Structure formats: structure tokens, C-alpha cells
Image (spheres, rainbow, N blue to C red):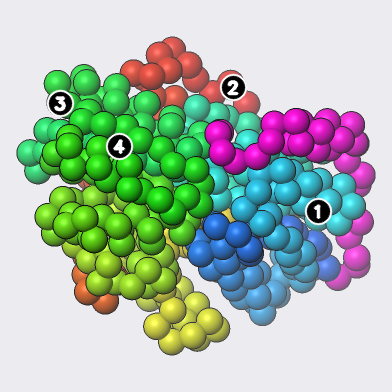
Amino acid sequence: MRGMYKPAGLAALLLAATSLSAPAPAWAADTVKVGVLQSLTGTMAISEVTVKNAEILAIEEINASGGVLGKKIEPVVEDGASDPAIFAQKATKLVQDGGVVTVFGGWTSASRKAMLPVFQKLKSLLWYPVQFEGNECSPNIMYSGAQPNQQILPALQWAVEKGYKSYFLIGSDYVFPRTANLILKKHIDADKLKVAGEEYVPLGGTDFSAVIAKVQAAKPDIIFSTLNGDSNVSFFKQMAAAGLPSAKLPVMSFSIGEQEAVAMGPSLVEGSYAAWNYFQSLDGAANKKFVTAYQAKFGAGAAVTDPMVHGYVDVYAWKAAVEKAGSFDPEKVRAAAVALDYLDTAMGKVKFAANQSLVQTGYIGQLDPTGQFKTIWQSKGTIDPDPYDPLVFPGKKCPAS
């Protein structure tokens, strides 16, 4: 997790957090508090503000239909400010002082890892909505975002099917890109293909001149990008300026969705690829209902992305688990969540597996001139989540519940 925070500062915050014991949440007679913790400022705000919006939309819809166990949900919104240390601090504030019964939020793996000991010590439950590198299981986190075998490896499968043999790996310098690329390198090698290069920039970095020079020298068939946040704007602009637009050198991204494409300008990223478990353009009544509701609240034409839908689904899954458990107690809710049947959602049928990760479908899309993805590949049915890639972490499994 380089380039993300000062370890001493985070360690001090975590030490303070883990010295606390969790109070019993104070529930008013007719309300129950939940935390919504996303980056509303900083480099990740381009992606996370809309996840917060989707989580709030789900809460408002549930309240309008009667709430949960007879209580209206009261969201307590906090800003993680694109800083893992602040995420840990705000998670502690929400659970320890805010009396919330659960928290929805996070994006970067660094933010999740900073929060994990807080939720474990305070015996609370985080619903994490974004794809990540796997190699983690915690009873205090519900992982609805894609595991590597549901996003990264399907993208590699597609690329191999297309005949690409040489891969250049570019990422932001923290745990998700580095672990994702470790997994990719193992599988690329196993397929007897070539890694043409591997480069990282600090999260929020804007200077890609040295990286692009290495790309030009390596002449890869395709770039796999684990860049996050607004670094993508600079990367695609500088690639185009160097004579390497997506039409000439394909880019497969793992963190660019419709929202980022609109913010960057669709013409900048037109023709590039992304791997997700949801696209706004997917067919289905549940998706049309969600997109219509989101745009009615946040603006006609507002873009909808995979992490937004996962955040929205997390709130509804929490509601279903609370009602199944007949309780807001995090441990009882966790046990109920993994026992739920398939939920009909905007991304299709999904459910939580015993390892607290989501069973879901993988999609590959290509960006069109409007900033929407045309689905060009999808997995054959849903994919069971596997947090530990067998090539990289042989024999490692989630502990039994």
C-alpha cells in the first residue's frame, strides 16, 4: 500500500481504535442508524460520491416502503476523504460514537484494510461494494464487489480468446493493483504469454510520461489498467497525445465505469474496454427500474456504475438479512446474509456465498461514444467467488464460519 498514507499515523489511529470496546447501539423507538462512509473529497471522490448517492437512494426507498423491522433507517454520512487513516477514524466514530448498527462504504483496498481491525474489534459489520484483490476473509466484512476470479481473470480469458499475447500492466501504487497484477502475471505465465511491462504511479498521480515511454518501447498488444480515481483522466489524455489512443492500443480497465467515462469525456476513452459485474446498458426490468429511480433523483442522464449498484444492493441485502434474522445484531445479520436465497437485482440474480462474497456474473464491455458500455462478452452463468487464487495462494481458504 505504498503512496497511500504514513504507516505511523495509521498505526496510531488503529491502536486507538482497537483500544475501544463497542457500546450497545442506541436505537430510538422508531429509527435505526446506519453509517454511509465514502470519499466525498479527494482523488477518489470522482468515483465514490455516486456510490454514496446509490446507498442513500436505497435507504430512502426502503423507508418509503415501511423501513426495516418497523423502524425507519437514519443514514449517518461521513467523508473518508480518499485517505485510509481517515476511513479508520470515521469508521470508529460511526460505530463507537454514532451508534450505527452497520456501515456501507469504502472503495480502495487500502481504505478497507484500514477499517478492518476497527470492525473486528468493535464487532460491527462493513458492507464493501467494490472489486478487490481477494486474499482476505473477515467475518466483519460483506464483500459484494468482484473477487479476482469474477473480474480480472474473466478479462484475461477474453483477451486470450481475442489472441492478445503481450500484456503491459499499469496500476495505482497500493495493494489492489499490486496483488491483482501478481495474480495476472501468474496466469499470463501459466498460459505461456508475455508480460511486456509493469508500472505503478501514486494514487492521484498525473505524470505518465515515463510510463508511456516504457509502453512505447515495449509495444504490448494490450494494456491492463488498475489505475484508480482521477489518475485515469491524465493517463488517457497523455496516451492520446503520445499517439496511442484506445483505437490503436487497447486498454482494459478495472476501475473505469460509466460515471468516470462521462466525467473524463467519452471521446477520450471511446473504444476502451472494462471488466465489471454490471453495466448500465444491461437488459432487465430490475435494472431499468433502478436506473430510472437514480436518474429521477440525481438528474436525467446521470451515469450508473457497477460499484453504485453494488452499494445499492448491499443496503437491500442488509434489509433482507435483518428481516431474516429478526434482529439488527451484526453477528445475527451476517449469519442470515449468507443464508439468503438469490436476490433479483439490477445486475441479475446474486447471493452471498458462505465466504461472505457475492455470487455474480462477469461482463466485458466496450465504451461507445455516449459513455455507455456495449457488452461484448459475459460468463456462462454466475461465478462463485474465490478469495484465494489457487496459483498465487495455493491451499489457502477462508476459515470456516
Which quadrant is home to the C terminus?
top right
Q: Amino acid at mark 4?
A: Leu
Circle nearer the viewer, 2 or 1? 1
Residue drawn at the location 87% of the way across and 35% of the way down = 16
- Going from the N terminus, do you reach mark 3 or mark 2 first? 3
Q: Main secondary structure of the magenta part?
A: loop
Judged left or right of residue 164, residue 175 is: right
Q: Tell whether position 303 is magenta.
A: no
Q: Position of residue 206 (x, y in %)?
A: 44, 54
Judged left or right of residue 313, residue 10 is: right
Q: Which residue is mark 2?
A: 400
Secondary structure under tag 4 reads strand
User: Closer to the camera, 109 or 212?
Assistant: 212
Whether tag 4 and tag 2 are in contact, CB under 8 A, the answer is no
Q: Which residue is mark 1?
A: 94
Circle 2 packing at 10 Å, graded few (<14), some (14-19), many (20+), is few
As measured in the structure, the alpha-carbon distance from the residue carrying label 4 to the one carrying label 1 is 37 Å
Q: Which residue is mark 3?
A: 193
Q: Amino acid at mark 1?
A: Leu
Circle 4 packing at 10 Å, graded few (<14), some (14-19), many (20+), is many
As measured in the structure, the alpha-carbon distance from the residue carrying label 3 to the one carrying label 2 is 36 Å
Q: Tell whether position 15 is magenta.
A: yes
Residue drawn at the location 50% of the way across and 27% of the way down = 135
Q: Amino acid at mark 3?
A: Leu
As measured in the structure, the alpha-carbon distance from the residue carrying label 1 to the one carrying label 3 is 47 Å
Q: Position of residue 105 (x, y in %)?
A: 63, 54
- Going from the N terminus, do you reach mark 1 or mark 3 first? 1
The magenta stretch spans which residues? Answer: 1-30
